Amino acid sequence: MAGNYSHTTRADGLILTAAIYNADHVNHITNATPQGLDDYSVNIAQMQETTDPGETGTESLAISTAEELKRIRFAIKELKFGAAAREWYETSSNDVENLLSNTAESSILGFQVFT
């Protein structure tokens, strides 16, 4: 969904008045909010994009807000599912019983299961 910003095209030779200048900047101030900015989910494929931010010493730095969102999505997915290949926004099936019975996920989450 598009953000709330609007753009006014000015004609060549228009004298830039204080009212025009101030109105343009009020547009920025009013719409430079999370609700006013554009999204990063134009379609399902884009909504599913994630990027591994790396580990200490091998960090992958974001160069835009879109890249930051992909790293946050990756972290959400990793927290919810460990190594399982599911989407970041799906409901986790990692209840306590499933975690305790899955030794691969339990080792990722940092605990041992003793039977």
Image: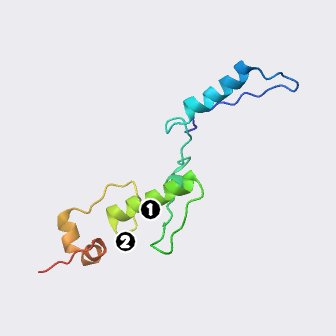
Image x and y of residue 82, in percent: 34, 68
Image x and y of residue 83, in percent: 37, 71
Which of marks 1 and 2 precedes in the sequence? 1
Looking at the image, the residue that sits furthest to the left is 115
Task: Please state which of residues 17 and 83 is positioned toward the viewer in this rendering.
Answer: 17
Q: Which quarter shows the N terminus?
A: top right
Residue visible at 83% across and 25% down in the picture: 11
Image x and y of residue 39, in percent: 54, 44
Q: Is residue 80 left or right of residue 69?
A: left
Residue 13, above or below 40: above
Examine the rendering and report whether any part of residue 4 can be seen: no
Q: Which quarter shows the C terminus?
A: bottom left
Q: Is residue 99 left or right of residue 15?
A: left
Looking at the image, the residue that sits furthest to the bottom is 115
Q: Quadrant of residue 91?
A: bottom left
Q: Is residue 3 left or right of residue 100?
A: right
CA gap, disc 2 and disc 1 = 11 Å
Looking at the rendered structure, the kind of residue marked 2 is: Ala
Instruction: Give the crowd class for mark 2: few <14, some 14-19, many >=20 residues within 10 Å.
Output: few
Looking at the image, the residue that sits furthest to the front is 18
Q: Which residue is disc 1 drawn over?
A: 74
Number of numbered labels in the structure image: 2
Image x and y of residue 24, in percent: 68, 27
State the mark number for residue 84.
none
Looking at the rendered structure, the kind of residue marked 1 is: Phe
Residue visible at 25% across and 74% down in the picture: 106
State the mark number for residue 83.
2
Q: Quadrant of residue 64?
A: bottom right
Q: Is residue 62 left or right of residue 107?
A: right
Q: Quadrant of residue 100?
A: bottom left
Q: Are marks 2 and 1 in contact (CB under 8 Å)?
A: no
